[in-house]
Image (spheres, rainbow, N blue to C red):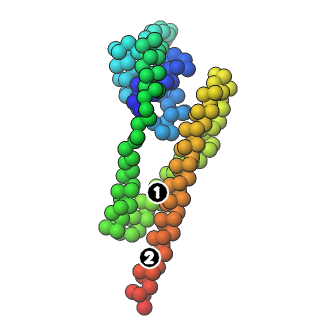
Amino acid sequence: MSLPHALLGLLQYKPATGYELKQTFTRSIYFFWNATLPQIYRTLGDMEGKGWLTVTVEHQDGKPSRKVYQVTQAGNEEFQRWLREPLDIPQYRVPTLIKVFFGNQMKRDEFVEHLHRWRQHHAQLLERYEKEAMPIIEHYARASGAFEDARYWTLTLDFGRRQAKMIIEWCDATLAALSKGKRRNQSPKAS
């Protein structure tokens, strides 16, 4: 997925400023795709140059002017073209698994600490999915009447929850296996 297509998708709902788009990222897509505010502004400028967006400058008393972006017909066509493309097969890169692969080359307690941190990260992520994401989906669905869209938003949330749960379960099983292996390896030395 590319940032321009994510922005085109968000702008399908309503025109927005770069700052508003960043806020929307933080409350929705952030869980599986993130962008910084400078990346968003740079990309919006590129998209405007391609004719995918128009910009309306809204002057405000005592505040900087706001640039409000809206999707053009060409932007809608590009977004629809991108949606019709076959799904990309992602190149799965997980740096933590490289450390796991070479885990025997580390001190066991450092390796175990890596796994605990990875587990903790996904436990916190799962908690955020359950406490924050679903209420946000429900709020936006009610506020915008996008109930059909909310079904699809919930599907992405379900993927995130399942992936986080799988990683937590894997960490627990791996830590348990390492703990059993450590006891077996230490027994002969202790005798």
The crowding category of the residue bearing disc 1, from other C-alpha atoms within 10 Å (few below 14, some 14 to 19, many at least 20), is few
Measured in 3D between alpha carbons, the distance from the residue under mark 2 to the one under mark 1, in whole angstroms, is: 20 Å
Among all residues in the image, which is located at the extreme left? 105
Residue pictured at 39% horizontal, 65% vertical: 110
For the residue pair 154 and 28, the one nearer the viewer reads as 154
The residue that disc 2 covers is 182
Q: Left or right: where does residue 183 sit relative to residue 102?
A: right
Where disc 2 sits, the SS reads helix
Please name the amino acid that badge 2 sits on: Lys
Q: Left or right: where does residue 10 sit relative to residue 4?
A: right
For the residue pair 145 and 113, the one nearer the viewer reads as 145
Among all residues in the image, which is located at the extreme right? 142
The residue that disc 1 covers is 117
Query: Which part of the image, by quadrant, shows the N terminus?
Result: top left
Residue 98 visible: yes
Q: List x then y, in percent, for residue 80.
A: 47, 21
Q: Left or right: where does residue 145 sit relative to residue 113?
A: right
Where disc 1 sits, the SS reads helix
Residue pictured at 42% horizontal, 59% vertical: 114
